[in-house]
Image (spheres, grey):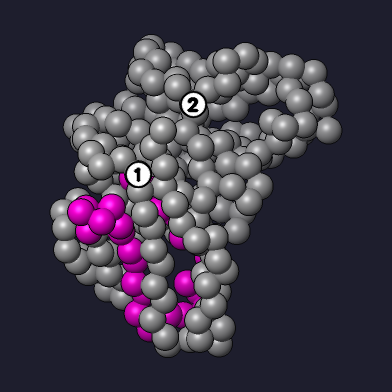
């Protein structure tokens, strides 16, 4: 029973490039959350998605960041024209459809480094 | 703006002692409270959840919740060096509201 799978685990991009981070939730989970963790900081909520719907994107920067969770396939967090301040660990978490968002299972994270 | 506050530490305790980690939150309507453990470079791992006032015990861990004081704590009895990690307090409202995390408290247990 695989947990939340994230890839790539490590990603290096130069300023101005695009970063795509993928997340496959726990089998049977239909709720996906993305969090960002800057060095020495806590986890900051970015976006909450269900299949084909963005439920809450109040934590997403207004520009350059987007997320989707298509009917088929993993959830994608996309960062366009990356800057050094985007360097962080990006964690995806999922929860089942028959409970609240409360019990999250986290993936191992994707660590983005912007040169 | 919902806020969750934790002392960043490090909190240093000797092996076998009780470690006490504290957390306060700003949103009075919060209903669900969690403690996650995060080892350096790893993902957060849920260790305790608590939903009602009082104490909840699970092995060496005890979570304590006081909604009137907007305060939640985690006690770790018989601390072990393997407990050395950052402990994140997380809070949410009802239903599918998202989790708000504190910055975490680093715990160091010395042999």
Label 1, secondary structure: give it. loop
As drawn, the label of residue B62 is: none
Residue at x-position 25% and y-position 42%: B28
As rendered, which of A97 and B2 lies closer to the eye?
Answer: B2
- Pointer 2 with pointer 1, Cβ within 8 A: no
The residue under label 2 is A59
In space, the residues marked 2 and 1 are separated at their CA atoms by 18 Å
* The magenta segment: B66-91
- Tag 2 and tag 1 share a subunit: no
As rendered, which of A86 and B67 lies closer to the eye?
Answer: B67
Can residue B7 be found in the magenta stretch?
Answer: no
Whole-percent x and y of residue A65?
Answer: 60, 18
Residue at x-position 74% and y-position 17%: A81
Residue at x-position 34% and y-position 66%: B74
Whole-percent x and y of residue A52?
Answer: 38, 12
Q: Is residue B44 above or below residue A22?
A: below
Can residue B69 be found in the magenta stretch?
Answer: yes
Label 2, secondary structure: give it. loop
Look at the image and tell me whether residue A39 can be seen: yes
């Amino acid at each position: 029973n695989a947990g939340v799978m994230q890839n790539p685990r490590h990603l290096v991009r130069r300023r101005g490039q695009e970063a795509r981070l993928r997340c496959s939730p726990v089998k049977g989970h239909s709720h996906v959350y993305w969090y960002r963790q800057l060095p020495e900081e806590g986890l900051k909520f970015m976006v909450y998605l269900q299949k084909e719907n963005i439920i809450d994107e109040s934590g997403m920067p207004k520009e350059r960041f987007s997320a989707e969770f298509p009917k088929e396939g993993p959830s994608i967090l996309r960062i366009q024209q990356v800057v050094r301040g985007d360097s962080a660990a990006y964690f995806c978490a999922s929860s089942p459809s028959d409970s609240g968002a409360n019990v999250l299972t986290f993936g191992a994270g994707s660590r983005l480094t912007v040169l | 703006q919902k806020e969750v506050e934790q002392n960043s530490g490090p909190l240093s305790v000797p092996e076998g002692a009780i470690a006490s980690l504290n957390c306060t939150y700003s949103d009075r309507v919060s209903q669900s409270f969690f403690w996650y453990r995060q080892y350096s470079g790893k993902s957060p791992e849920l260790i305790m959840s608590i939903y009602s006032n009082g104490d909840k015990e699970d092995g060496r861990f005890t979570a304590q919740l006081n909604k009137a004081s907007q305060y939640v704590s985690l006690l770790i009895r018989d601390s072990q060096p393997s407990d050395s990690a950052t402990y994140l307090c997380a809070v949410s409202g009802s239903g599918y509201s998202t989790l708000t995390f504190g910055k975490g408290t680093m715990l160091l247990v010395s042999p």
